[in-house]
Amino acid sequence: MKKFITFCDRKNLTCIRGFLEKHLTDLVSNPVLRNQIIMAVDEVCSNAMIHANQCNGNELEIRFQNSSDKIIIEVIDKGRAFNFSGYKTPEIKNIITENRKNGLGMILIKKIMDTVEFKRRGERNICRMSKKLVIGN
Amino acid sequence: MNLKITEEKNYSELTLDGELDAASSLQVDTVINELLKKKVFTLLINCQKLEYISSAGLGVFISHREHLKNQKGGFVFFGMNEKVKNIFEIVGLDKIMSIKSTRDEGVTLIETIVKQK
């Protein structure tokens, strides 16, 4: 397992994407698909930084592991819990008609990743995402 | 992210250079708000050097889209790489935003919008 530990500050999103790019390059050769996965994780991290931790400098950990057929990425923070089961993902058309800046992130995460789950373990929030690896991609 | 604004006669060109994420989207939003204060409602968005866009970046354009439209203006994007264009496509924004391949195509469309005012 590969780990990357950073802090809840929007400026650190660039480093997180760099960490992911480094470990995904050999697994996902298609740059468009690789960018989708990086973006989905970037969305989870920015939500954790902004909404769960108010960009307060708390620690944020990203764990990356892969098997022959899938990758698993976890984002761990100690901020406010996110009630994923009670969260109703907005409709894209509503975001557009309401001129909203927010709301697209979770839509993209769900569209891109095969599985997404949020759990609370003690003081920690754990978002675990997986994506199947397809030969040739 | 580096931003450059070029003021043309009837529109402004905003060049995005770098990565448009939850951090840099604040900067882009501020620049667009400043242009709106100057009554610039027709914006050519140069994406030739845009390496990455997140939902926060998309959100900036969604949030201003209707205001520009109401003023008979709008955004015209050009020069997107495949990664950036794909993110617009995933959420269907390529169907409601004006996206052109080249600068010439973008300028032609923006001049059409300006003439219709």
Image: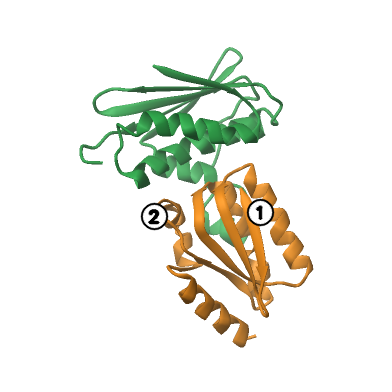
Chain for numbered disc 2: B
In this image, A75 relative to A136: left or right?
Answer: right
* Percent position of residue A137, x then y: 26, 41
Q: Return the residue found at the far right.
A: B37
Q: Secondary structure at mark 1?
A: helix
Chain for numbered disc 1: B
Task: Determine if marks 1 and 2 fall on one subunit.
Answer: yes
- Residue B34, quarter of the rendered image: bottom right
Disc 1 to disc 2, C-alpha distance: 21 Å
Residue at 58% x, 44% y: name it: B21
In this image, A112 relative to B74: left or right?
Answer: left
* Percent position of residue B16, x then y: 58, 56
Q: What mark, if any, has residue B73 been given in the picture?
A: none
Amino acid type, mark 1: Val
* Colour of the chain lettered B: orange
Instruction: Give the residue at mark 1.
Output: B28
* Percent position of residue A38, x then y: 44, 37
Q: Which chain is green?
A: A
Residue B90 or A86: which is nearer the viewer? Answer: B90
Residue A88 shows in this picture = yes
In this image, A10 relative to B76: left or right?
Answer: right
Amino acid type, mark 2: Glu
* Percent position of residue B84, x then y: 45, 53
Residue A39 or A82: which is nearer the viewer? Answer: A39
Residue A86 shows in this picture = no
Q: Secondary structure at mark 2?
A: helix
- Residue A37, quarter of the rendered image: top left
Instruction: Give the residue at mark 2.
Output: B82
Neighbor class of circle 2 (other Cα within 10 Å; few <14, some 14-19, many 20+) is few
In this image, A4 relative to A114: left or right?
Answer: right
Looking at the image, tell me whether mark 1 or mark 2 is earlier in sequence order.
1
